[in-house]
Amino acid sequence: MWRSLDAVREWLSERTRSQFAWSLRTTPGVRFGGTVVCLLAVVAVFGPLVSPYDPTAQVLEARFEGPSLAHPLGTDALGRDVATRIVHGARVSLALAVAATAVRVVIGTTIGLLAGYVGGLVDTALMRLVDIQLAFPGLVLALVIAGVLGPSLRNVMIALSVVGWASYARVVRGNVLEVKDRPFVEAARLYGTPQRRIARRHLLPNVVNPVVVLATMNLGTIVLTAAGLSFLGLGAQPPTPEWGTMIAGGRDYLRSAPWIVTAPGIAIMATVIGFNVLGDGLRDVLDPDHLGERERGRS
Amino acid sequence: MLRALLSRLGSLTVVIAGVSLITYGLIYLTPGDPAHTILHERRGSSPSESEVAMFRAEHGLDEPFVIQYIEWLTGIFRGDLGTSYASSEPVTTLLLQYLPNTVELALAAMAVSLALSIPVGVVSAVHRDTWIDRTSQFAALLGISMPNFWLGYLLILLFALHLGLTPTSGSGTLAHLLLPAITLGTGLAAIVTRIVRTSMLEVLEEEYVDTARSKGVSERLVVYKHALRNALIPVVTIVGLQFGFVLNGAVVVEVVFQRPGLGTLLVDAVFARDYPIVQGVVLVTAVAFVITNQLVDLAYVALDPRIERGEHA
Amino acid sequence: MRLDVSDLHVRFRTRSGPAHAVNGASFSVDTGEIVGLVGESGCGKSVTARSIVRLEDPGEITCGSIEFGGTDLSAADDRTLQRLRGRELAMVFQDPETTLNPAYTVGEQIAEAIRVHRDPDDQPFFRELFAGVRSRVGSKRTRERVLELLREVGIPQPKDRIDDYPHQFSGGMRQRVMLAIALARRPSLLIADEPTTALDTTTQAAVLERLKTINDEYEMGLLLISHDLGVVSQLCDRIVIMYDGVVVESGPTEQLLSRPAHPYTKALLGCLPSRSEPGETLPTVSGSPPDGSPPSAGCVFVDRCPFAREGCREGERPASDLDDKRTVRCDVPEAREADIEAMREATAADPIDGPGPDPGDREQNVAVAVDGGVQVDSPTDTTVSPSRSAVGRPVLELEGVTKTFRTTDAVLDRILGTDDRLTAVDDVCLDLRAGETLGLVGESGCGKSTLARVIAGLESPTTGTVRLDGEPVGDVDSRRDGQLADVGVVFQNPGTSLNPKRTVRESLAEPLLEAGWGKRRREERIEELLSLVELPEEYADRYPRQLSGGQLQRVAIARGLAVEPTVLVLDEPTAALDVSVQATVLNLLERLQSQLGLAYLFVSHDLEVVRHVADRVATMYLSQLLEAGPASQVLSKPAHPYTAALLEAIPDGEPMDDETRLAGEPPSPTDPPSGCAFHPRCSMADEKCERLEPAWETVGDANSRCHYANELTDDQDEK
């Protein structure tokens, strides 16, 4: 190594990287974000089992009750317990986010690998497809797709799955192009390794990290967008407990019963913060070169 | 140079053609036959065969898809995007009527966010890991994670309902613009702050920054002359991409503040299955987005002397 | 002004505790003196240099002082620093790719230094910002001065270049611009951190010479940081040797090089290929290089020193003065008095670089040869191996091999057919026999790596034929299994040629797996390979990031050998390694060759290394072979002026000969010159060379592409 200062730097980062699991656990972002996300998952899975109220049953004599011991977050215009509805809402939001992200990752990674590895005309064609997808502002397209399919939670999931994969395709393609010319891939060609095996053995593991980071951040974005769509009336239909729908339902009572709007908003925010902080932390550990950075602004 | 421009125009044409095809094709996602569904939803009961046929003939839905699409496409070049199913008004007229409000909101939000994010991002990077940095990073995190419709209601609650400083809804005056612009600008400001900070941190690690220091250049000039200029290059691209974010946000914010604009027009049209309007709005926003990004690429060339020709894709 | 660094300590904070980069460095630079600060990577020399100009961040100076002209820099405030940097103290960094601001013209960047020099305390914010936006030097007086500086550092046509941006300059030219920025302040001390490491040998020679002239004219002190003893001996009055953050020895160049006192200095000198006979086993330093852990009591070199005694581990080793000019941090008389030859015997016992098993186990190296037999290889074997006289049929033949590339990849160009082509390899004829090493040398961009890739099958030749064992072959996709197995490749940077996500075992298994070897056989072969490259078996389960550079290159070599090739293509295999590690890798290659009868194609830019390893040498320039022949002939009596110029450019402490010195830089391969490709830079060129392309003619045992090849060799005979 003749670049001595770089050598120092590299060796510093070697020191941190060699204790990979350790650094994963001690990165504050991963710790905090991970805790929030785990907590949410626990609430989403077990919360509905222990909450004493029915999230949809109307109790007309208990309308607009402020926060109290019986109703820690108050009740809404139909007398339903806000806290219970938020706990049930977590299930809806997380399930939707995970499903939509999974579809995006699969579509995006496949297209990115193909474009990057095959190259040539296939690359040009696929990248035009990506450009076309990226030409639509994400929410506008999702809104129209969900609207045309008819308002429902399932259709919002479909809409959010078919938009937003392009970011993954771009990140993966960029990484593949970068990794493809590395000598270790050329070395594999020397032994006559078939292309498919090269892609699986050498390219995929090296592009997984930025995808993991991007997906984590994306979970947060999807929670936000889905809430937005539900708020506009396109997603979950009343009386399904969903955070965006709850905000929409409370907006007429903003002055008299502000908790109806405030509580689900904080729930959304906490979820998104959790995913963002976790994503940031993961990126520091998994993707120190910020390969996925540029794509975050998209979708 | 000419060659690069030509190849860029080529791919731009492909993208816009694709966008228009998808935009037009979207209505065929309607469960069942569009004409039937529209009439059914409008009247609440199943329409008769003849009614459906009449609706189809009236709106050109009886032609094969390719013909419909080509007619719609050729119409665009004549400035004709069809007429609204509900009001029978030309879509172009409606768009021209609502567009200025949305543009106004988008520009105001951009202005708010850039005025906030660039200084904060720079200061954050320069004072890395101090309380200033942590505070602004935390604020940015809140800004990114907050649903903008919810922020809108909080602002209405505080400034309009409690303090009575601004109107709650509508459009027209600067006071009407204030809350929507802040609502929409906050999220954007948060994103751009983080990008400015990251980009500055990267540039501050560069050797040429140390070269400048080793010359005896004052620290202030090292930051603002040598680092910021280079740090802004990627920021420009990202801000261009964020135009999409602004368009997304405008839809929701317009609904919250009940501002007449492309967003409210779109949402109403989606619920009424007024497809010509939906297609018109989607096409306009997508094309605007594509063109903005092309302009941003040109700005990029101007900012970065390393890119002499148009090879930056 | 005099610089006095005493007892400097610098450390870096990391998550796993502090890393100690400098552990008490002391030295001085007198007015007008040239001092070389030498050491291997990680020894703390760069950190020391940066600390002097106080750019040590993110490191911190924990102890010691840096006196410069009466000011203690380690305690100076920002204002004083700003003033000193603007007027007295200048620094040139290593990598010219990254040290100039890409957003401003070079003229503006030099002019800024001039403005700061005029008054370091007065830097109006908006004037400077505006100057940046304009990025063209306006003031006539400043512009004149910038042009003068550009001329002074040797940039041709400065008037045309002043408003260009850094990316429009080549590496050597950028480094000159950096020099101009430094000189703009008329400094009394210039610190140059590896200023020529990123440059080609010929460019390096020119930049070094420029530094020397400037030092004379300005009466400026110069602190030259380098890993290269050759560079330092060329230029410096005095040399300071650093090891593990400590100065182990310092003294006048002549004395230090001829009579080194510290065992580390001896080891460092001993492992230079230029100090040994070609083919001879190089002496190496045993044990592992320092890792930044806190300094232990006692001598820093004790773990690797063949003369170490019990007492060396205890107590501070003070620097003692040998005479009034020399200091050494070693108090074992035998060690100080031993000559380098003695070190050779004392250190050759353990060839492993890095943490390994107990050296006691490694007295004899038992290796299983490919044919299944066991060979016992004596590690102290210094005799010339029998392989150096290769005979028999060529295993690899190149016939008129040409490779061109498209310069654009746009669809539009393909349709219009307007794509320009760049010739990377032009009509190359070569052959390689079993047991022989062919050294391929040339400057960066000459096409030597492309040629290696064509041979390996990573590119297919545009025209011409590559033959393996007499049979023509194409690229890897069309080669049969046996043909694939025939050629092994070792890439330049082992850090990138091994997949970071796969263990050593997985990396070694891959070629075996593809060749269809069964599991048992694979496991056995991996064990065999590791012992061939002298790595302990337990390294099989490590990841690349857990290995040092030298160890990684051993793994890469093992992988190259996995399926028993007859030809091994080595693309700059030691370029990324420190000299001491380079020595161990070269020794290993030498041993493997004699043991396995391999043919090597050894691509390198380093003539000293090539002289050491090669039986035959070929020089390449602008995609063509200019000369090829036996190493002994080509490197002592070159039959081409380009080879002569390359030899002359080797930094060896001797002044350059004006006649053979290379002027300018290689022309662009997209627009090669007419006639002889080398004529624009050739001191012998005349009108004939401009017009006529010389043929590939035989001169003695060699071939040369020069109209005046015979005259050239005759001249040398007369001398």
Image: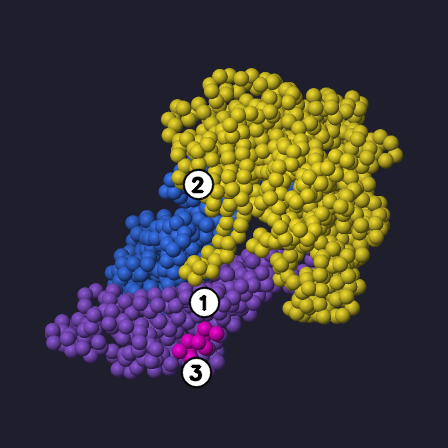
Chain colours: A blue, B purple, C yellow
Observer-nearest of C666 and B153: C666
Badge 3 vs badge 1, beta-carbon distance below 8 Å: no
Label 1 element class: helix
Q: Position of residue B248 (x, y in %)?
A: 40, 67
Q: Which residue position holds label 1?
A: B6
Q: Magenta stretch: residue C110 in it? A: no
Tell me the residue at 50%/57% (across/down): C420
Residue that appears at 81% across and 39% down = C238
Q: Which residue is mark 3?
A: B172
Q: CA distance from mark 2 to mark 1?
A: 35 Å
Relative to A98, C318 lies left or right? right
Q: Amino acid at mark 3?
A: Gly
Asked whether residue C41 is in view, the answer is no
Secondary structure mainly formed by the magenta segment: helix
Residue C236 position in % (x across, y down):
79, 41
The label shown at residue C475 is: 2
Q: Relative to residue B230, is residue C464 depicted above or below?
A: above
Q: Residue furthest right?
A: C324
- Which portion, as a residue range, is magenta? B99-107
Residue kind at label 1, given as amino acid type? Leu
Residue B101 inside the magenta-drawn segment: yes
Looking at the rendered structure, whether the residues under marks 2 and 1 are on a common chain is answered as no
Please name whichever residue, B232 or A185, is drawn nearer the observer in this view of the structure. A185
